[in-house]
Structures are given as C-alpha cells and as structure tokens.
Amino acid sequence: MLTIGILALQGAFIEHSMPIERLGHLSKEIKQPKDLEGIDGIILPGGESTTISRLLDSTGLRVPIQNLLTAGLPCMGTCAGMILLAKSIEADSVPTLGMMNIEVKRNAYGRQLGSFTRMEVVEKISDAPIPLVFIRAPYVIKVAETVEVLHRVDQHIVAVKEQNLLALAFHPELTDDLTFHKYFIEMIQQN
C-alpha cells in the first residue's frame, strides 16, 4: 500500500484523495514540510496557480518539494499543478517549481465559460475513451526533447511526462474514471 501526498493548500485536493483510496492506497494532505515525510508520490492539484505558488512560500513547502522532485519523487500535476511544474509560463511571472522542461500557456481555453469535457482515447494509457475535464485549463506550448507528449486535444499538448513527473491540463479527479490515477500509481511502483 502506497502513501500519496496531495498538496492541500488550495484547490481540488480533496477530490484527489477519493480515487487514490478507491485504488487501495492511502492519501495524505500536505500542508507543511513535515507532512512530506513517508510519502511515495505527490499530487499537485488544480486550483489557482498564483495563490498556490504564494502558499508554497508562506508554508515553507517550495524548496522541500523541489528537493524531493529533483531526487526522483513521482509527481502528478493537474491543471494548476501543470503550471507549477513548468519551467516557464507564457507572458506570466508566477513563480513555479521549475521542474519540468515545458512552457505552459495559462487559461489557454479562456475563462470559466471556456470549460469543456472531451471523451478521448489516450494512447499508451487507455484503450477506451475516458473523460477529460478542462476548467480554465492551460496547455503546453513548448517541450524539450526529454519530455514525452502523452496526449493532444485539437493539436494542443494537454498531457506530458518527463522522468518522474506527469503533468495534465485537465482534471481526472473530477470524474469517476481512475485511469490517470492508476497510471500515476504504476509510475510510482516502477520508480
């Protein structure tokens, strides 16, 4: 049984605990540096990336998380979590964790009214169509050679993997589908 940390500063962190527990693992809310002890992986949830970034500093979590990710701790970032993992953000100065060799466009699909759901087959991950929920979603506009593009929607990159890091522009935690949480668990087990 794995223990998956979920950054619980702001955003959809509670929603990530349900699929983790449905898959037979423990979830642990991460609110301060000592909470990072004993975790096998970490999820950076959707939410407001500027707010989460500020809270990473005020709680003292930024550097300990960066150190763990550099050391190989598996991480899944969804929506705002994708933004936080990116090395750069187009036309924006939000301080990120700077861990993934990607450039991201924030609110790429527009504001709340630009939210949508797609049923898509994500090759290498699902044989059947799965729901992808986009809410004020980013997408990736540049990737380094070290980054594997896992999926595109309308030619925009919405899922990427680089070594121990998985970044998704959408919200798998807002559906009943366990595909991406299962994929993340498998990443941890293979680590």
Image (cartoon, helix red, strand yellow):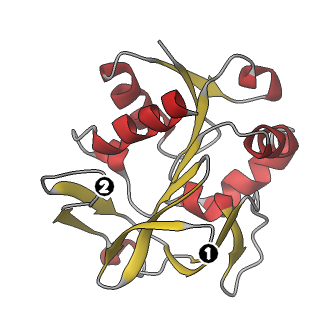
Q: Which of 48 and 142 is in front in this view?
A: 142
Residue 145's label in the rendered image is 1
Residue 75's label in the rendered image is none
* Circle 1: residue type: Glu
Instruction: Tell me which label, 1 or 2, sits earlier in the chain.
Output: 2
Q: Which of 33 and 184 is in front in this view?
A: 184
Can see residue 6? Answer: no
Can see residue 108? Answer: yes
- Image height of 57 relative to 40, above or below: below
Left or right position of 176 against 69: left
* Circle 2: residue type: Lys
Residue at the image position 33 percent from the left and 22 percent from the top: 23
Residue at the image position 31 percent from the left and 55 percent from the top: 124
Residue at the image position 56 percent from the left and 76 percent from the top: 106
Tell me the crowding category of disc 2: few under 14, some 14 to 19, or many 20 or more residues within 10 angstroms, Cα based. Answer: few
Question: Which of the 4 quarters of the picture holds residue 142?
Answer: bottom right
Q: Distance between the residues labelled 1 and 2?
A: 19 Å
- Image height of 51 relative to 101, above or below: above
Q: Nearer the viewer, residue 142 or 64?
A: 142
Residue at the image position 74 percent from the left and 55 percent from the top: 53
Q: Mark 2 points at which residue?
A: 124
Left or right position of 23 against 137: left
Query: Judging from the image, what secondary structure is the residue with disc 1 in?
Result: loop
Question: Which of the 4 quarters of the picture holds residue 32?
Answer: top right
- Image height of 178 relative to 136, above or below: above
- CB contact under 8 Å: marks 1 and 2: no
| Image coords of residue 14 (percent x, y) | 45, 32
Query: Judging from the image, what secondary structure is the residue with disc 2 in?
Result: loop
Tell me the crowding category of disc 1: few under 14, some 14 to 19, or many 20 or more residues within 10 angstroms, Cα based. Answer: few
Q: Residue furthest top?
A: 1
| Image coords of residue 132 (percent x, y) | 27, 59
Left or right position of 29 against 25: right
